[in-house]
C-alpha cells in the first residue's frame, strides 16, 4: 500500500510537469535573459506556471538553463522573497542535470524529505520550435499529504 501511495504521488508530479511544459513557449523562453523579470514575455510565462503550481499542489515550479558548465534559474514561481532572479545560479550541478539538457526526462520515484518539505522532483526538457532543448522545467511536487498518510 505504501508503494502504491508513493507511486500515485510520482504519477501526479509527472502529469503536472507534462502540463507545465506544454504551456511554455520555448521560442519565447530562449529569448529571455537576466533582468527580464519585468518584461511581458517573462510575466506571461510566469503567470501560466503560477496557475499550474497553485492548482495542482506543486511546492516549486521553475525553469532552468545552462551554459554547459553551470545551471541557472529562468522563471521561478516562488512568491516569497526567496524567488530566484533570472540567471541566478541553481544549487544542483550541471553534471546532475546534463541528461535532461540532452533531452532526457527525470522522474524521481521516491519522496525526498528536505528542509523545504517532502517532495517528489521531476525535470523535463523544454524544446523550441526546431526541436532543440532550450531549458529544463523543474517541478517539485508537495508530497507532504502522502507522507502524513504513510505515517498513520
Image: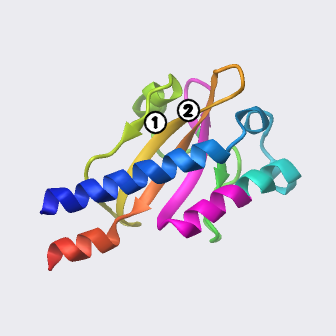
Q: Quadrant of the C terminus?
A: bottom left
Q: Earlier in the sequence, mark 2 or mark 1?
A: 2
Relative vertical location of residue 45 with respect to residue 55 in this rendering, above or below: above
Mark number for residue 93? 1
Q: Is residue 51 magenta?
A: yes
- Does residue 96 appear to the left or right of 3 in the view shown? right
Q: In this view, does 59 lie to the left or right of 152?
A: right
Per the image, the residue denoted by label 2 is 70
- Give the crowd class for mark 1: few <14, some 14-19, many >=20 residues within 10 Å: few
Q: SS for tag 2?
A: loop
Residue ID at (35%, 52%)? 11
How is this picture coloured? rainbow
Point out residue 126 in the picture as x, y percentages from the top left corner. 60, 34
Above or below residue 97? Residue 63 is below
Look at 79% across and 39% down and name the residue there.
Answer: 32
Residue 19 place in picture, x, y as percent: 56, 49
Q: Quadrant of residue 69?
A: top right
Q: 53 or 67: nearer the eye?
A: 53
Is residue 76 visible in this depiction of the protein?
A: yes
Amino acid at each position: 500500500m505504501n508503494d502504491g501511495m508513493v507511486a500515485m504521488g510520482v504519477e501526479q508530479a509527472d502529469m503536472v510537469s507534462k502540463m507545465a511544459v506544454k504551456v511554455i513557449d520555448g521560442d519565447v523562453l530562449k529569448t529571455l535573459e537576466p533582468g527580464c523579470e519585468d518584461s511581458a514575455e517573462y510575466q506571461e510565462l510566469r503567470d501560466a506556471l503560477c496557475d499550474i503550481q497553485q492548482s495542482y499542489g506543486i511546492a516549486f515550479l521553475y525553469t532552468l538553463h545552462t551554459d554547459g558548465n553551470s545551471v541557472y534559474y529562468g522563471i521561478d514561481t516562488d512568491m516569497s522573497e526567496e524567488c530566484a532572479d533570472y540567471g541566478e545560479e541553481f544549487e544542483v550541478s550541471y553534471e546532475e542535470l546534463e541528461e535532461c539538457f540532452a533531452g532526457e526526462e527525470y522522474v524521481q520515484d521516491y519522496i525526498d524529505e528536505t528542509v523545504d518539505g517532502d517532495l517528489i522532483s521531476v525535470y523535463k526538457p523544454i524544446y523550441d520550435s526546431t526541436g532543440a532543448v532550450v531549458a529544463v522545467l523543474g517541478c517539485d511536487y508537495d508530497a507532504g499529504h502522502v507522507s502524513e498518510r504513510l505515517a498513520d
